[in-house]
Image: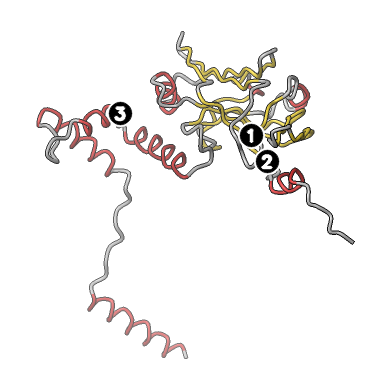
Amino acid sequence: MPKKKSDPIDAIRGKLPKQERRTYQGEISLRAEGDNPTIGMFVPFGRRSVELWGFVEIIEPSAFTKTLQERGGDIVSVWNHDPNWVLGRQSNKTLALREADDGLHGDVTLDGEDAMHKHFARRVERRDVIGTSFGFETVRDDWVTEPDGTVLRKLVEVKLFDVSPVTFPAYPDSEAEKRSSAVDIATVKAGVDIAQLAVVLASVEDGKIPETQAEDFRGWLAQLEALVPPAAPTIPADEELRRRLGLRQRVARVA
C-alpha cells in the first residue's frame, strides 16, 4: 500500500504556537496635543505579509469583530511586549480599538505625569520606534495553495490579547528588542537622556569624549552607577578561618 503523501499545510499548522504575534512596520504615530500624548497604531486588512514560516498571510476584514465585543475590557497595550510596562487598557478607556474598512485602528492615551510614558512618546515621535504589533490566538483561518506554490493563510477570526508599539518590527520577541527595553527603563530611572547620550558618544574622537561634553558624560555615568547594588563585603581569610573554627566548636559542644 503506497504511503500517504504528507500535506505541507498540515505540517505548517502543526508547528504554529497557540499564541502568535504579528508586527507591521511604519504603522504607528504620535499625537502630542494636551498633557497626555496618544500613540496611534494600525493593523491592515488584506495586506500580504512577508514569508513567515513557509507561508504568507493576510487578515480578513472583520477578523477582530467578535474579539472586540467579547474582550472589550481585557485587551491591553504594552511597550515592546513587556507586561510590566502597560501603556493603556480598554477597561479604563486609555486604549481605544475600532475596526474600519482598511483595518484595526488603535489609540492608546499615555500618562503625561509618568516619566516612562513621556520617554516612550518621545521614542515614537523621533521614529526610533516604528512598529505596531498584536498578539492573538487563531479561532478560524483558511489555507490555500496558490498556482505558483505559495501557501496563503487567511486569518478569518482571532482572539486578541494586545496591540502594542515595538522597536524591531522584523524581529518581534528578539533578544535585541528585550535589551532595548531594558536600556530604556534603566536610563529613565537613572535620569539619563539616552538621546543626548547617543549624541555625545557619536562625537567621540580618538577614543575620547570632547571636553565640552565631558562633564555631562561623567554625571550620566555617576547616575547609571547608582543603579548598581553595592558589592557584598568580603571576609578576610583569617577571619573566615576563625569563624569556621568557632562553628565547629559550637557543633562539637552540642553533640
Task: Residue at 53%, 37% (x, y): give it.
Answer: 172
Give, as a three-letter code, the residue at label 2.
Gln
Q: Quadrant of residue 113?
A: top left
Kindly identify which residue carries mark 2: 19
The answer to whether the residue labelled 2 contacts the one labelled 1, judged by CB atoms less than 8 Å apart, is yes
Q: Amino acid at mark 1?
A: Gly
Left or right side of 245 for 210:
left
- The quadrant of the picture occupied by the N terminus is bottom right
For numbered disc 2, what is the local secondary structure? Answer: strand
Q: Is residue 159 above or below residue 227?
A: above
Residue at which label 3 appears: 193
Which label is found at residue 13? none
N-term mark: 2 or 1: 2
Q: Earlier in the sequence, mark 3 or mark 1?
A: 1
Neighbourhood count class around disc 2 (C-alpha, 10 Å): few under 14, some 14–19, many 20 upward? few
Q: Residue furthest right?
A: 1
Residue 54 occupies which quadrant of the picture?
top right
Query: Which x, y percent locates residue 246?
Result: 33, 83
Reading the image, the residue beneath label 1 is 135
From this viewpoint, which residue is outermost toward the top? 33
Density class for disc 3 (Cα within 10 Å; few <14, some 14-19, many ≥20) is few
Q: Residue at x 34, y 35 (%)?
A: 187
Residue 214 lies, in percent from the top left, at 14, 33
The answer to whether the residue labelled 3 contacts the one labelled 1, judged by CB atoms less than 8 Å apart, is no
Measured in 3D between alpha carbons, the distance from the residue under mark 3 to the one under mark 1, in whole angstroms, is: 31 Å
**Residue 14 coordinates in the image, percent (x, y):** 73, 48
What secondary structure is found at the residue carrying circle 3?
A: loop
Question: If you read the primary sequence from the N terminus, does the residue marked by circle 2 or circle 3 appear first?
Answer: 2
